[in-house]
Amino acid sequence: MGGSNLPAMGRTEVLRHRRVGWWAGGEPADPLAALTGSLLRAEIRSRCPEFSPVLVHGAPASWPEPGFTGEPVAVHLTSDWANGSSAPLSLLVASGAPEPGGSKIAHRLAETGTALVAVAPEEGWGLEASASVGAPFAVPEPVLLAARHLSRHALDARGAFLRVVEGLPRHYVLVEAGVLDGSGAPGAGGDLEPALRRLAQRAGGDRPAEVVELVPGPLTADDPGAQHFLAERRAETEEGRHQPEDWLGDPGRPRLGLRVTNPFDLAAAVAGADVVVARSGAMMALAWALGTPHAALAGEGTPASNFAAWTGDASALAQDGAELVATIDNIFARRGQPRGLKRLEATLDQSLDDAAANLVQKAAGMKPYGGGGAVPEASWHERAQELQAVNEALRQRLAVERLRFGERAALLEQAANTSVESAIKAVHGQDVIVRRRLEQTEKEMRRLQEETARQQAELRAIHASLTMRALAPARAWYERVRGVAH
C-alpha cells in the first residue's frame, strides 16, 4: 500500500457512523471501470479502516453483468428521497465517470445536506483538475494500481481458468472492445486487420497467435443468447480452430470473443496476452502496469494520449493500422515492469492521501447518519437488505461460472467419446506435420551426407599430397642406401 499523510488511525472512526456513498456509475456493466473502482476503494480503506461505502448507481444495477465486484452493499438512488427532508447519504464520493446521471444526483444530494468528496473523478464532474483523471498533469489512470494489488500468481491462476472455460489460447493478441468496429480511432476498423495479422505473426513466432476481441455485455444462465453463444463456440468452430494443421491466424476462421465474468478476469486476460491493442487510457494503463506489450489506437487529447504523456512514450499511440505496424518493434519492447511505475504510483498515493484526509475532515464536521451516536435500527435493516441483494448477485455469478464450466466439460467429453471425425482430423493433422518434419529431416541428412563426402575427398587429397612431400627425402635416401649396398 502507499504511504499516508492522514491523522492517527483512531481519528478515522468518525466514518463509522456516516453513511458514505460511492458513485459506481457504469461499473456494473463495465469490467474495466469496476476494476478501477475496486482498486480505489481498497486504497481508501487502507487509509481509513472505518470506511465502508455504499455503491451508488443512477439506474438499477444488472448484477450478473461482468462489472460486478461483489462488494458488501449497493443501493440504487431513486426519486423517492428527492422531496424528503433528510438525505439518504452523509457523503458522496465522486469517482470515475459521472454517467449515467451522476452530476444531477450529486446536485440533488447536496441540496439535502450531503457533502461531496472527489476521489480520482473524470473531468465530466466539473471538479478541480488536480483531482481529476484524464487531464494532462492531473491524476494518472488509477487502474495502474492493479500491479500493486493483484499478484502474478493470482492472475496466472485466473488465466488458466479462462483457458479451460473460455478456450483462451496460450498466445493471443487482445483487442479492446470498439477497436475493430472503427470507434477506437479514425483509421481503425477494417484497415486494422493486416496490422493485427502482423502482430499475431510476431507474437506467435513460428505459428501465428490468435486475435481475441473483448466482447461487452452480460452472459448469464437466463440470457437468451447464452446457450447459443456457448454451444456455437464450443461445438463446430472449436473443433475447427485448434487443429495442428490449421493456421490460427486465418482471417476467415471464427474469431474468439472473450466475455469476462468479473473485472479480475479482465486483468488476467490482459496479463496473459502477448499484445494488447487498446483504445482507452484505462486499458492502456492496465497493460502498461502489468508489463504486457501494448499500443493504443487513439488521437491527441484523448485519455490514452494523456496517459502516454504521463509515461513519456508517445510511440505507444497510433492513428491507424499502418502506424501500428511501423512501431511494432517498440510495442514488443514494452515488456516487464515499467521503470516509471513507482513514480506514477507515488503521484496517485499523494492524490489519494489528500482525498482520504478530505473525506475524514468532512465526515468530522457532519452529524452522524440518523442524528444519533450509533447507526439507527432502520439503517441496519437497509444494510441487511443490501447484503441480501449482493448475496443473490454472487449466487447468480456462481451459477454463470458453473454453467460455462459444465458446458465446456460436456462438450469436451462429447468430443472425446463420439466425435470420430474430429479424432480422425486430429490424427491426420498430426500425420501431416510428422510427415513434413520427416521430409525436412531427410533433406537435411542428404545435404549433410553430400557435404561430408566432399570434405572427406578434400581431406584425402590434402593428406596424400602432404604425405608424398614429407616422404620424398626419405625415399631418395633409401634409394641411395640400396645402391651402395649392391
Image: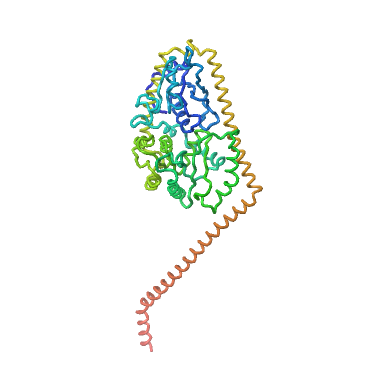
For the point 34% across and 36% down, the residue is 309
Q: Position of residue 149 (x, y in %)?
A: 45, 31
The answer to whether residue 305 is left or right of residue 18 is left
Q: Position of residue 362 (x, y in %)?
A: 40, 16
Q: Is residue 108 above or below residue 422?
A: above
Q: Residue furthest right?
A: 418
Q: Residue furthest top?
A: 372
**Is residue 180 among what the camera can see?**
yes
Q: Quadrant of residue 402?
A: top right
Q: Is residue 250 above or below residue 259?
A: below
The answer to whether residue 249 is left or right of residue 125 is right
**Is residue 157 among what the camera can see?**
no
For the point 52% across and 23% down, the residue is 74
Q: Position of residue 129 (x, y in %)?
A: 35, 26
Q: Quadrant of residue 469?
A: bottom left
Tell me the quarter of the image containing the N terminus.
Answer: top left
Observer-nearest of 181 and 416: 181
Tell me the quarter of the image containing the C terminus.
Answer: bottom left
For the point 55% across and 21% down, the residue is 386
